[in-house]
Amino acid sequence: MIIIKGILERLTYQNPDNHYTIAKLRIAKINDPVTIVGHLAGVFEGESLEISGKWIIHPKYGDQFKVEIYKVVLPATVSGIRKYLGSGMIKGIGKSLADKIVDYFEENTLDIIENEPDKLKHIHGIGEAKKTLIEQTWNKHHAVRRVMQFLQENGVGVYHAATILQIYGSQTLNILQKNPYAIAKDLPGIGFSLADMIAMNGGVKKDDENRLQACLIHCLLSFEQEGHVYGLKKKLFQFCSRLSGIDPDRFDKALEQLIDSDEVKIETHEDETKIYLSRLYKAESIIASRIKAILSMPVAPLNISKDKILEEVLSKLAIKLSEEQLSVVNNVLLEKIVVITGGPGTGKTTLIRALCEVFKLQNLKVTLSAPTGRAARRLSEVTGEKAFTLHKLLGFDFENQTFERNFANPLELDVFIVDEASMVDTLLMYRLIEAMPVSAVLILVGDTFQLPSVGPGNILSDIIESERIKVFFLTNIFRQAKQSPIIMYAHSIRNGEMPDFQKAGAGELSEFYFIENQTSEKVVETILELCSKRIPKAFPHIDEIQVLTPMHRGEAGTINLNQQLQKVLNQSRGGIESRDIMFKPNDKVMHLKNNYEKDVFNGDIGIVAEVIKTENKILVNYDGRIVEYDILELDELTLAYTISVHKSQGSEYGAVIIALTTAHFPLLQRNLLYTAMTRGKHLVIIVGSSKALKMALNNNKTALRLSGLKQKLMLP
């Protein structure tokens, strides 16, 4: 690494949340200041810095120095200390008082202020109040510097150090010195290794009980991130052993201590011990008990005949229900909880619309919801009824991570319809079922063959497989759907059958194509041409093209494809940069997390309507509604010319292009391909290699998720 030293001349930009900083550093004997970038917490203009890192070349701003390690260098000479204190940086110390303090303590001045502030009262003009003000200001000014110095001395890089500081604030140093393994619980993924570095440097032994407990929690959190609700004891201990270098048998005591402190729960069935994080055990247990409680309630009789249902639906919706649909509607009225499932073209949406009309005819309050903003809007569009995201409906407070609606404050409804239910994870289902009155009816609608939820659990499949709840499988593909190659080939993929691509592209203009490209480079080249030339020319009626890819990294991942597509599709000038992304007018962007204040949600896609550089903000158009973002909020946005298949769930697009290469092999599964294909309404094009396609088609082993809901529901 390269080391440079200089004086921080100007803070151009600093994110108060993660401390990402762009600044100018004045270096001796160099005329122009150097631009430095990185996560620099606790730095102030006028301070001397020693920075380690590397030179990078920004495509627009040229040479920059990327900071990997830094430290604030306090002056050591009397003249330097005099200048530092006399700058007015420390509240309560002006130039005159600075001179008095330095004249008295000389080169020991800063050490006295930091470690023995009571001695300041030896100076004429400094009493208890003034001493306290100086002490508090100094500590506030340098607290962050001490934390960052401590973390970097223990091998923690500036990015993770800034993240730790964000979590613990002013208590960071105290927490890390007392029990560094707290990070393992609060920073899933990387927390344990960071804590281990700090603890080992502090002399903690490898078999320390805090270390072993933290290792167990870390591994359970890792399992959760993979979609599991629990871990099996034997596998968990082996995982912990590899990570810690400690024999698996040594973890029994640590596990007992975690059980005693109520951080984990265990279940034993025959020779198998399941280990849960307590919150996941609670969530799964309450889902099962609440479902059983609702099922135990009597069903309110609805006096409506099949003929009346047909008449009502036909008159209100101009739709004639099939025998299968009519049977489902009639039987749903006899149940407290039901699941409606089926592939594309089987009429799930029509059923939702019909059920809404039938329940309204009985003066029952029906509430429609879906897990994401896009899915809720789509549900609203196709039904003509208002639909909510589950988080909004349940009154989620993002800042406090709490839900307004719960057992004590239930939702006010008679019928609760949840679309795209395959996307609902264990924790969200717990909140949903807890907030639902036991007198209400719950209808879960979804396609079990789509990708499972991003969060832990396999809720919809577990409920179906428990056989505790009535399930209606829609199998009849309607005539109009049968005319769609997209739907027919999606069902082929679902059944593990390779589509006949020659037949698919035989017509002058088909709805489904496979374009063979062997390399990721060629895949990207073809996608750029399809988006910029071929599709707009051949299908001018298609107003939205969405590129989907399994992964973020790699040449055919979302990051690179977004950059390349932006170049060819958006020639607008000017923009604002954040996290190496240049946001320009007319860019297609996606919101990345639920923001209830702005009323935009994870997965919402909009267009940049305006960039106001003088005010460092951009305006995004979400279906006619303008939302403002200042530069500090741009970490909530990313380019959306390409998105991951997971992010596309619950949405539909005019045309879908799917990148499929062997480089995507970790995620090549049949349900991923099926999910991607069923996002397209009028056109689906797969661009990639036959080998990758066959890998996805033949891999029907959806990563087996460890979940106990099925078993809990099956118990009496």
Image: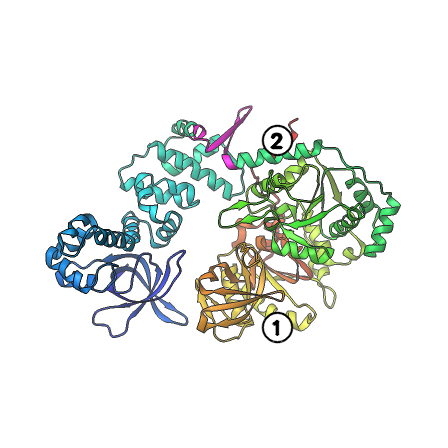
Query: In the picture, which quadrant includes the N terminus?
Result: bottom left
How is the structure coloured here?
A: rainbow
Of the image marks 2 and 1, the number of the one nearer the N terminus: 1
Q: Residue at x 67, y 59 (%)?
A: 680
Q: Quadrant of residue 405?
A: top right
Mark nearest the camera among 2 and 1 is: 2
Q: Which residues are magenta?
A: 258-279
Position above or below: 246 against 315: above
Q: Nearer the viewer, residue 98 or 72?
A: 98
Q: Residue at x 47, y 71 (%)?
A: 575
Identify residue type, mark 1.
Lys
Which residue is identified by label 2?
712
The location of residue 235, given as percent across then percent down, is 47, 33
Can residue 246 be found in the magenta stretch? no
Say which element carries label 2. helix
The residue lying toward the viewer, choosing from 445 and 692, is: 445
Which numbered dot is residue 533?
Answer: 1
Front-lying residue, 375 or 474: 375
Q: Is residue 13 visible?
A: yes
Q: Amino acid at mark 2?
A: Lys
